[in-house]
Image: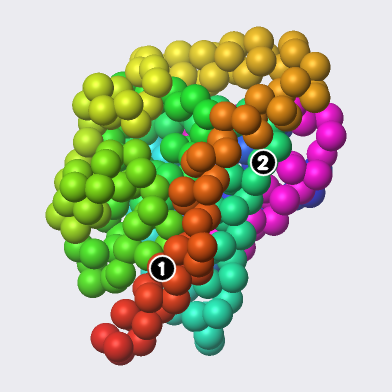
């Protein structure tokens, strides 16, 4: 598979692990990761030896910081709009089962590992949106669809507009994640589940992924909701500059 600056891909026994990082440590969300993630998802989707995908972060946090300057260097919002659509659609369009392994606090784009068929979280994980409304930006790049879908519309809107933090145990109670484990057991459990699933024939895995995600894909990609939300975020930023 290709080499990426912000993504490490490991492929073994039918399982492809996609691990996000910055310089080998926790991901600092930046323009390079924004571009590469859509590319990596498309590459994994086109790899027929992949039967299960694991999406995770690095070290003790999934993503808690952002390199805003790297995005400010973009001359046009159209680039972010185009790449942002590819990320969400790329996650939803994966044709095989996906496991999200949340390795720690996820304050920025927590939806990346949460758009999975099963989500395992370290007990140190905390979920929040610290990069949109509470910092003067429209929450329109997919979070406006995903969090109300996961939490329900009332709780989802409150979550996005207040910066509310949800710890791993509360996320389990709310149905946002499926399992909570110790940090040191996270990847072992994710791979255990992935390898068990990968023991099945590829057609059965593909058809199961398709059957179980029909309603989710229709909801999250309905009409032009993703494109519209991204456009509104860009308009909001331009009006404050």
Q: Is residue 215 magenta?
A: no
Number of numbered markers: 2
For the point 59% across and 11% down, the residue is 192
Instruction: Classify residue 162 by image quadrant.
Output: bottom left
User: Are the residues flagged by discs 2 and 1 in contact, CB closer than 8 Å?
Assistant: no
Q: In this rendering, is residue 202 above or below 188?
A: below
Residue 38 among those drawn in magenta: yes
Q: Residue at x 27, y 86 (%)?
A: 240
Magenta highlight range: 33-60
Q: Secondary structure at mark 1?
A: helix
Front one among 147 and 100 = 147
First of labels 2, 1 by sequence position: 2
Percent from the top left, x then y, of residue 170?
22, 26
Residue highlighted by disc 2: 94
16 sits left or right of 34 in the view:
right
Residue 232 in which image quadrant = bottom left
In the drawing, does residue 156 fall left or right of residue 94?
A: left
> Pointer 2: residues within 10 angstroms few (<14), some, or many (20+)?
many
Mark-to-mark CA distance, 2 and 1: 22 Å
Residues packed near mark 1 inside 10 Å, few (<14), some (14 to 19) or many (20 plus): many
Say the numbered circle drawn on residue 229: 1
Q: Identify the mark at residue 116; answer none if there is no mark.
A: none
- Residue 118 location in percent, x, y? 49, 25
């Amino acid at each position: 598979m290709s080499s990426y600056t912000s993504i490490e891909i490991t492929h073994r026994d039918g399982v492809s692990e996609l691990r996000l990082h910055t310089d080998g440590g926790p991901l600092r969300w930046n323009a390079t990761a924004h571009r590469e993630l859509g590319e990596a998802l498309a590459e994994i989707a086109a790899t027929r030896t992949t039967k299960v995908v694991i999406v995770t972060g690095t070290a003790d946090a999934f993503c808690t910081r952002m390199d805003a300057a790297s995005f400010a260097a973009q001359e046009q919002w159209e680039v972010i709009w185009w790449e942002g659509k590819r990320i969400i659609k790329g996650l939803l369009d994966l044709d095989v089962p996906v496991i999200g392994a949340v390795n720690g606090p996820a304050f920025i784009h927590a939806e990346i590992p949460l758009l999975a068929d099963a989500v395992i979280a370290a007990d140190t994980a905390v979920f929040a949106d610290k990069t949109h409304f509470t910092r003067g930006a429209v929450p329109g790049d997919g979070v406006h669809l995903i969090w109300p879908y996961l939490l329900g519309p009332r709780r989802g809107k409150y979550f996005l507009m207040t910066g509310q933090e949800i710890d791993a145990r509360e996320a389990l109670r709310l149905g946002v994640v499926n399992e909570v484990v110790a940090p040191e057991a996270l990847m072992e459990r994710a791979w255990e589940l992935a390898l068990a699933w990968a023991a099945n024939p590829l057609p059965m895995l593909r058809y199961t992924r398709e059957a179980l995600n029909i309603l989710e894909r229709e909801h999250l990609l309905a009409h032009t909701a993703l494109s519209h939300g991204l456009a509104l975020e860009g308009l909001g930023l331009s009006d404050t500059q």
